[in-house]
Amino acid sequence: MLWAGFLFGLLGSFHCVGMCGAIALALPGAGQGGSRYVVGRVLYNLGRVSTYATLGALAGLVGQSLRVAGVQQGLSIASGLLILLLVAVPERYTGRAAAALGLDRVLVRLKQTLAYFFQRPSLSALYMSGVLNGLLPCGLVYLALAGALSAPGVGGAAIYMALFGLGTLPLMLALSLTGRLVPLQWRARLRQAVPVVATAMAVLFIVRGLGLGIPYLSPQVANGQPASYHPAAGHAPATISVCHAAPAK
């Protein structure tokens, strides 16, 4: 259900407005007019989508390795538990963990490079700004990547994260074009809804991984195939995986 990535991105885009809205409003080229101005904003957002798709492919590699090890259903449950953990742990602690791993130095370098492209209003610089913005720490992206672990293969995980990025695009693009869209007081309220959506998705992952025999939602698996799969009947093998949104810019 790769479409769930788009749905999660769409619902979580209000979080992006609160976390990255300032960057979208400060994009270079504000003095430009006409189609070039619009194209620049579109390229910036497509840069973010490109990064999310690449990160999704990396998550897919991890998930594929675990599926080869025969832990397909366990992976779905683990993805749900990971999402719940990310929801429960305050972002300040994840920041401390990143500092302990030395990632803070990488973040400083990343911000310096982003500032470099911000000083250049070319279309390619705007695209690269979006690419780098997609690498900035973001709880919503981490939640989405946790869901991508259960996507069907590397390509499926990349598509899942690309759809997640496209889900955030309408609101973020509108914000960068109009300068304002959602009142500040509403941003905080809408951001509070993100953990609720993420928790619901996590429960869905866990239920699906339990194989409770509920069609489409939690099908039973036998010998790596759904209970309803009968090779003699000519059915194609089905992949039991969960691609629901995960929750975080």
Image (cartoon, rainbow, N blue to C red):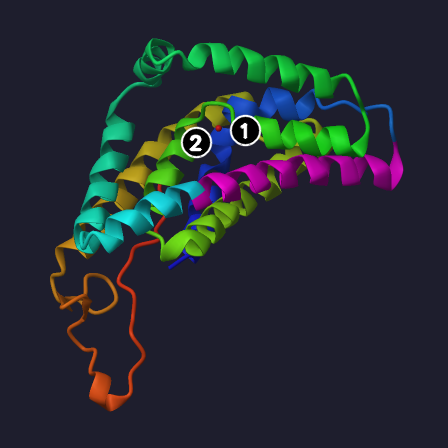
Residue 196 at x, y = what percent? Answer: 30, 36
Q: Nearer the viewer, residue 18 or 156?
A: 156
The answer to whether mark 2 and mark 1 are in CB contact below 8 A is: yes
The correct choice, above or below, for 210 with respect to 101 in the image is below
The circle drawn on residue 190 is 2
Q: Nearer the viewer, mark 2 or mark 1?
A: 1
The quadrant where residue 134 appears: top right
Q: Residues within 10 Å of mark 1 (few under 14, many from 20)?
A: many
- Residue shown at 49% from the left, 27% from the top: 186
Which amino acid type corresponds to the residue marked 2 in the rendered image? Leu
The quadrant where residue 11 appears: top left
Residue 66 at x, y = what percent? Answer: 25, 48
Specify whether residue 49 is in view: yes
Magenta segment range?
Answer: 33-57
Which amino acid type corresponds to the residue marked 1 in the rendered image? Val
Q: Which residue is mark 1?
A: 17
Residue 21 at x, y = what percent? Answer: 59, 25
- Residue shown at 81% from the left, 25% from the top: 121
